[in-house]
Each structure stands twice: as C-alpha cells, then as structure tokens.
Amino acid sequence: MPGAEHFAAPPEWQWWILGYFFFGGISGGSYALGTLLRLAGNPRDVRAANLAFITSFVALVPCPIFLTLDLGQPIRFWHMLVDASPGGGLAFKPDSPMSLGSWALLVFGLFSFVSFLGAIAEVGWFRATAPIGRALRGGAGLVWNAIGAVFGLFICAYTGVLLAVSNQAVWSDAGWALGGMFLASALAGSAAVLLLLARSRRDVDPDTATRLEAADRYFVILETILIAVFLISLAFAGTISKVLGIWIVLWLVVILGLLASLATARSDVARRWPPVAAPLLALLGVLALRALVIFSAQT
Amino acid sequence: MGFFTDTSICIGCKACEVACKEWNQLEGNPAHFTADSFDNTGQLDAQNWRHVQFIEQVPDNNGVVMTPTPIAGGQAWLMMSDVCKHCKNASCMEVCPTNALMRTEYDTVYLQKDVCNGCRNCISACPYGVIGFNEQQGVAQKCTLCYDRLQGGLQPACAKACPTESIKFGYVEDLHKVADDRLATLQKQGYAKAQLYGRDEKVYGGLNAFFLLMDKPETYKLPNAENATLPSRNNLPGYVGGVATAVVGLIAGLLAFRNGRMNGNNNSTNAH
C-alpha cells in the first residue's frame, strides 16, 4: 500500500497547546469521573465526587488562558465565537472541530463552574454557595452532572479530532483513533489525579481509592488498545517513522505510565511503591503522549 | 477568475515573486542559503505568495540522445511558479473557526486579516503548504489573487510581470480551453508526462489556479488525486471513535465503581 503524501506546513502549535490538551483532558475527565461516582450511587464516594468536580474546574481555569496566549492576536480571542466579518453573526462551524471545541469549552465551563461552587460548599470550604450544593444533591443535580459530563468527555476527545481534521502527517493519518486515544488517556489521567487526592486526604474513603484504581486500570487497557490502533494506522499510512526516532524517549514515559497503573493491581508492587508514585507516573505518561503526538508531526 | 500556470515555459526568472512582493508590500524573509538549486525563497509562506520551484532532473541516459531532447521543454530542469490554488473545495475554509477565510465574488479564497486571530488551523489544513504565519502581525497570510487589483480592473501583479506568459490570468473556463490546447500540442510533440493538474474536479473540486505539469504532481510537491483529501474526511470517523471510546470508558468506570460498591457492602455485612 503506498504511503500517504503530505505537503502541509506545520502550524507551530507548541507548549501552550500541549498545556491546553493536558489540562483540558484532566478537566473533562475529572468531571466525567465525578459524575460516574455519583451515578454509581455509593454514599461513601460522594467526597471523592466533590473533589473530582473541584479538580475539573481548577484544571479548566488555565485552558482558555493557554488558548488565548497561543493566538497570534490574543485580543481577538472572541472571534472564535462571534463572526467579526461584515454582517457576521455567531461563528459556529460544525465542520471545524476548533469552532465546535470553542463553544463546547464555553458551555462546559458553565457546568464545571456551577458544579465547583456546589462542591466547595459540600466539602465545607465555602459555605456561601451551600444552596447550589444542596440543589445539586438530588436528581436534578445528577442530570446537571450528566449533561456536563457529556461536554466534559467532548473536551477530552475533540482535541484529537481537531488534529485529525487536517492534512498533517501523523495527525490526519490516525483517522478515527486520535480522538478516542486522547479520551481514554484523559480518563486514565483524571483517575490518576483523583487517586493522588484520595491518597493524600484522610476524609476520602480508602475503598474509593481502590475503586478508582480499578477504574484507572480499565481506562489504561482501553488507552493501550487505542495507542495500538493509532500506531497501526500510521504504519498503513507509511508515516510511523515520524513518531519513532528521538520520540522513543517519550514513548518510554508513556509506557512507564501505563505499566505503573497496571502494576498497582499487584499488591506486592503496590506495597513497595510510595502511594503517589503510580499516579504521578501515569500523569507524566498522559503529558508525554500528547507531547509526542503534537510535536512529532510538526518536525 | 483564476490562474493557469504553464510550467513548460517557465524560465525561473522570479519576476512573479518580485512583482507579488512589490505590490503586496511583503518584506520577504531574511536571505539564507537553501542548498536547493537556484531557489532562495524556499517555500510559500506569509512573505512568499509566489514561489518558483527549481527541480533538477538531469537524466542519466548513458549517453543516448533522447527524442524529443529532454533538456528542452522543462524536462531536465523543471520550474514552476507555485501559488495558492484557490481551491473550489478549500481545506483552509473548512477548518477556519473565525470565518476569516472567505469566498470572494471572483470565486477566489481570501483571508481577511482583520478577522483572523492567528489560530493557525488553516496552516495545518492546507495540503499545499500555501499559508504562512506572519509573526509581526500575528495573523495568517497568503495570496489574495490581488483582490485589490481585480477590483480596479487590473490583472494580478504576478501575471502582469511574467515575461513568458507562463502565468496566465482570466476566466477559468477560458483558461481551461487554453490549457487543453497547450496540452494537446505538447503531447503531439512527444511529451508523454505532460499533464494538467487541477483542471478537472478530481483535485479539491477543481483549482482556480491550475497548472500544466511536465511530470507527475508529487515531483512538484503537489498531492496526486488520490492524496488530495479534505480535512473533513476525518470529522465523522473522529467523533464516532470518540463516542465509542466514551461509551466503553463509561461502562468500564461504572463497572469499577459499582463492583466496588457491592464489595464494600459485602465487607460491611461480613463485619456486622
């Protein structure tokens, strides 16, 4: 099969975009996990669910800042939402993942912020927002979380679709795999963040941490499968060499992160390692995966 | 309106590059050694809206004289004045989130500098590497097909300056006829590899700036019809892949959390 030809110039998306992809993934993934913890219905997981919503908003705060700083004309950030052309209305283009993502980020920001206000009241950090916390406790709150989680998951995945919807080598060759791979990686990374928090706080039920570990392992398996699909896609397109060479170093970090999450299933390994080691390695792996996808295609 | 660039009569004088920079007030990039034949501009970008490619293909025929003589007709040293193709189905327009890239009344693709916010998504999408980022102005830039000159009833600067009429400007339908005649002449003369690129709809629905090439498109860094794909081809598969992963991920997460709950409940029961 002849390899795909690419003559596109690189867009020079660098560190700000890497930062956004990382924090955006953690934000969306944490919100989804917080919702799942609520949906699962174990009262002892409520504390962790609230921490997940708080994590989601804290991780979301730098996202629009990073995106704005990456623009050549940061002052025109609002052009993403409003068409500044003569006679233009709203800038909403379903064919453009960047346009959809801008709107999704705005809507998800609302869900994440309201859930954050409720969560900080529920954990006792800020009583003034207690009415929001109470309003989000019941079925209506669960619906609110479920809708927010849909947008959160979109934030995790669309970044991969955005890269794929291009004519760049690697990105466009990955086809359908990139969005799913980023989503699975974001869920695994978010589980790692929540594990870090759960293990560092006494008010989180230890069983919740065990459940988060189990979920993390599922997400890591899913991520591993999608990484394999991604590499196979590149092999068929004849562009796999672009993600090898010096990028092997980052692949090693990715593999280490995946293995660290899986290794905690073995109690003898878990006992020997500091409790924060596996989640930290997993997070580094999430960052490394995005870095190698973003940078390798542009060199 | 559009261009027909006949590479068989391009002499590599770069008058088009100079005229383009002069009219559009492009400063150009600092001079550097490209180590690529007579090419000193390197590629199309924010400062080079026309770029003359020099492709050296001196044949090694073991002394056998070819008929027709390969040195003639641009077969040994291919030259092409490259430019934005003003595609009928434009990849850049598909992905631009701000609508800065628009279709003009001349059917050309125009980048509104005052609307562009410098996200550079169009650069990642353009399959020809046409669009560049202007660091000073913080916006993307590319050939406008001299929109301002067209409004004044003038032809684009590059076409005006081309001494061999390798760059022809006019109504695309008229240019098609000129191109067809020229191709027939070349093929009659024995130039079997001569071909039109972007004349028909196989490449991005047709190009408003199309070419007569003396070799296959890839030689000129142009994707062939098979590889000339729009970014949107990955839209639906990308989102479907994301949704499928989300569904599997959510089920996996729920299983992990609910299994844990059942185990937790069992533990609690045993403890009692």
Image: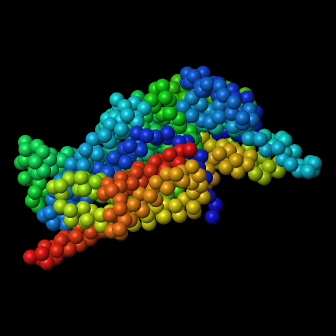
Image coordinates of residue A1 in percent, x first then y, are 63, 64
Quadrant showing the C terminus of chain A: top right
Classify residue A245 as left or right of residue A165: right
x, y percent for residue B48:
59, 31
* Residue occupying the point 35% across, 68% down: A268
- Residue shown at the point (56%, 39%) measured from the top left: B130
Instruction: Identify the colour scheme used.
Output: rainbow
Is residue A169 something one can see in this rendering?
no
Above or below residue B100? Residue B201 is: below
- Residue A144 location, quadrant: bottom left
Between A294 and B240, the one lying in front of the other is: A294
Residue at 93 percent across and 48 percent down: it is B63
Residue A206 spot, x, y in % from top left: 21, 62
The quarter of the displayed image where residue A31 is located: bottom left
Work out whether B59 lies above or below A46: above
Q: In the rendered view, tell whether residue A246 sits above or below residue B269.
A: above
Q: Residue A240 location in percent, x, y?
A: 57, 57
